[in-house]
Amino acid sequence: MPILSRTLLKRHSVLPGFDLALGFALLYLSLIVLVPLSAVFLKTFSLSWADFLAATTSPRVMASYRITFGASLLAALVNALFGLVTAWVLVRYEFPFKRLVDAVVDLPFALPTAVAGIALTTLWAENGWLGQWLPFKVSYTPLGIWVALVFIGLPFVVRTLQPVLEDVDRGLEEAAATLGASRWQIFMKVILPILIPALLAGFALAFARALGEYGSVIFIAGNMPMISEITPLLIVTKLEQYDYAGATAIAAVMLVASFLLLLLINTLQAWSHKRQGGL
């Protein structure tokens, strides 16, 4: 039977042969992804090792790393918590305008980042709708960067968790309840272990997305060097100053960090599929 199944699958495949399909895939990947990214490293190689270290470890650049990675990490942590709550509400409860709320979650996906930045600045500026009532500043501070990154990262966690929550077998919860487990014990010992792989993957996606965010941040950040300047903005600034080698050196550091995050995401997704397959 396995031999027959493989034969039928091969016979009725709608895709071209493996060699041809692999060739098209590698060609597309090379033209769209690998060639542009390799140009970053090629330009960076024009620098000596001392110049590379000077360009990527100056006080201003290091401050931008701290702001970018720190705000991205905090935003991803908050999104992991509230994304779990949001996904839980959307999956487990029925309430008026549920479809509208579900659609609003995807708004940061569809909204142009510049529009999001202007809207957030309007809300959180000192004379904004919400900012005028606060005893502290949000816009033009690192806190404003964090707010923008929370806004754009939430959908990644929610949409990663939703399908997993929908597939959780309610029978496991009922069995635990019949054995005397409380609601908190059911969540912590039955549901959460199933959700952890997807939760970690959503966290990593939100973190990676926040690292590269530009449009929604520059309007609310204030962009003050050493205080609220993110690394993507610093790259653009160096390009405007015709310091192409310095810009590509910083971009190469961010590119390596993003690649490591994507590797982590793929590992977590593989772990998630393996864990769910064993349940």
Image (cartoon, rainbow, N blue to C red):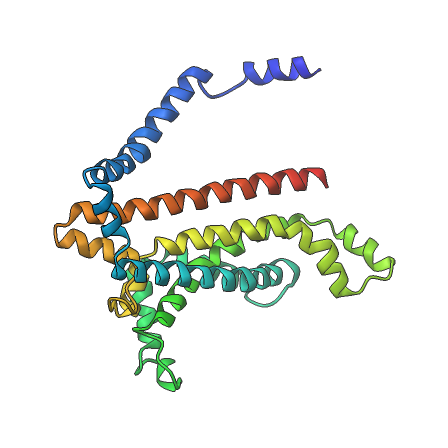
Residue at left offset 61%, top offset 16% = 6
Seen from the viewer's position, the closer of residues 103 and 52 is 52
Q: Residue 215, position in %: x, y?
A: 29, 59
Q: Quadrant of residue 214?
A: bottom left
Q: Residue 179, position in %: x, y?
A: 87, 58
Q: Residue furthest right?
A: 179
The C terminus sits in image quarter: top right
Against 166, residue 271 (above or below) is: above
In the image, is 44 to the left or to the right of 112?
A: left
Residue at left offset 53%, top offset 49% = 201
Seen from the viewer's position, the closer of residues 69 and 180 is 69
Seen from the viewer's position, the closer of residues 224 and 25 is 224
Q: How many dots with numbers?
A: 0
The N terminus sits in image quarter: top right
Q: Residue furthest front?
A: 50
Residue at left offset 78%, top offset 51% = 172
Residue 98 showing in the rendered view: no
In the image, is 261 to the left or to the right of 42?
A: right
Q: Residue 41, position in %: x, y?
A: 26, 38
Residue 220 showing in the rendered view: yes
Q: Residue 142, position in %: x, y?
A: 35, 70
